[in-house]
Amino acid sequence: MDPQMQALYASLVPGPTAWYIIALFAGLYAQYQAARTNGRTGAASFKDYWFKETPGASVATGIALLFAAGATIKGGSLASMSSWEVLEFGFSKAFLFDAVIQFPSAKSDSPAAGKAAGFARPGMLVALLLALVGCALFANLEKPKGFQDDAAYMKGTLAGGVRSAAAALRSGAIKVEDDEKVQEYAIKVRDGVKLAESMYGQCIATIPATTVTPGQGGAPAVAVPASASAIQAAIDACGKGDAQSQLRLTQAILDGLTAYLLQRGVKTQ
Amino acid sequence: MDAVTLLKGLQIISALNQAALLTSSALQTVSDMMVKAHSENRPFTAEENAVLDKMVDDALADNQKAIDEAKAAGRT
């Protein structure tokens, strides 16, 4: 193919960032359909759901997603993921964020989230803006480079979030039942990371230390030590397989937990 | 805005401020560990992994303690 045509073709094929954004929208739409099916929204259309029914919660979802998606895109981790992982990650993040933020109070007698909102929705915006400022402070931290770093960062975020929940409970900012839910999700995230690490460890354990070269002309096969680059490539592959998929799914739960924490932290009694 | 709402708002700001500090501190620990591992071009050691796991387990234990204390105090 002509080089110019190749360049044109490359410019038309969506990259990981574009797929990620498409997946985010797909996740939001799926959450809207789930809300309709379960009677959590009275909006007549997707447009009404976003712009008429609960504009405050919608803006909060938008800001939360903008921050989370921006950090992911800027961090460059999409480039190391397969197309499926990008779609899975984007979809689950948008679906969970919208679920957490738009979900009405359990004690609400209204099927629509808007009537259960009250002070919590503008408070949510304030909380997210504070989180944005916090993120700017984190920008100087070392960037994750691979599976182990991602897992370590998740543990750091989880530990900080859980400590914060305990502090919020002690200060009276959240209720016991809210913190119990936080604890329940946090244990799921901890176990999810452990499962991903276990899968990664099992994969690493299967990497052979030697490479067997078949013998020529009846000669016996020869085993030679695998090269450092081959071993590194195998380690990298372990960090991009099922273990990383498991970690991404757990990351989505952790993101949901963070949003839940922020929402509960600003909820009035 | 009544006094109760104002007090609630101050509690929230205080909790969020504490949350930012605690999360920042935990992530700084992770970041320092990563800088060391990257500079030495190696994965985390078993001891470093144990530190990270303990950080999470300690936080969960502290939160459970806070829940138990709140329940014992009659809070819902």
Image (cartoon, rainbow, N blue to C red):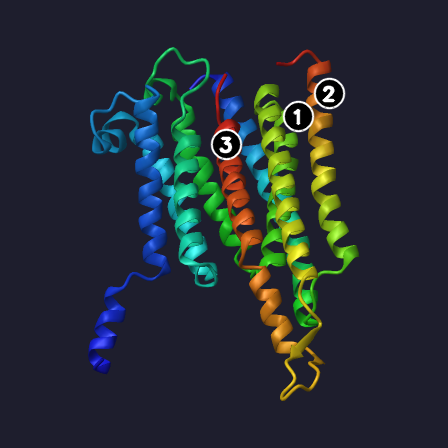
Can you see residue A7? yes
Binning the other alpha carbons within 10 Å of mark 1 as few (below 14), some (14 to 19) or many (20 upward) gives some
Q: Residue B13: image x %, image y %?
A: 53, 33
Q: Nearer the viewer, mark 2 or mark 1?
A: 2
Residue bearing mark 1: A170
Residue bearing mark 3: A260
The Cα atoms of the two marked residues, 3 and 2, are separated by 22 Å
Query: Image quadrant of residue B30?
Result: bottom right
Disc 2 + disc 1, Cβ < 8 Å: yes
Which kind of residue does numbered mark 3 sit on?
Answer: Tyr
Of helix, strand and loop, which one carries label 3? helix
Q: Nearer the viewer, mark 3 or mark 2?
A: 3
**Is label 2 on the same chain as label 1?**
no
Which kind of residue does numbered mark 1 sit on?
Answer: Arg
**Left or right, residue B42 beside residue A26:** right
Residue shown at 53% from the left, 22% from the top: B7
Q: Earlier in the sequence, mark 3 or mark 1?
A: 1
Query: Image quadrant of residue B41?
Result: bottom right
Which kind of residue does numbered mark 2 sit on?
Answer: Glu
Residue bearing mark 2: B69
Residue shown at 56% from the left, 27% from the top: B11
Residue shown at 50% from the left, 50% from the top: A135
On screen, A168 above or below A139?
above
Can you see residue A145? no
On screen, A162 above or below B41?
above
Q: Residue A139: image x %, image y %?
A: 52, 57
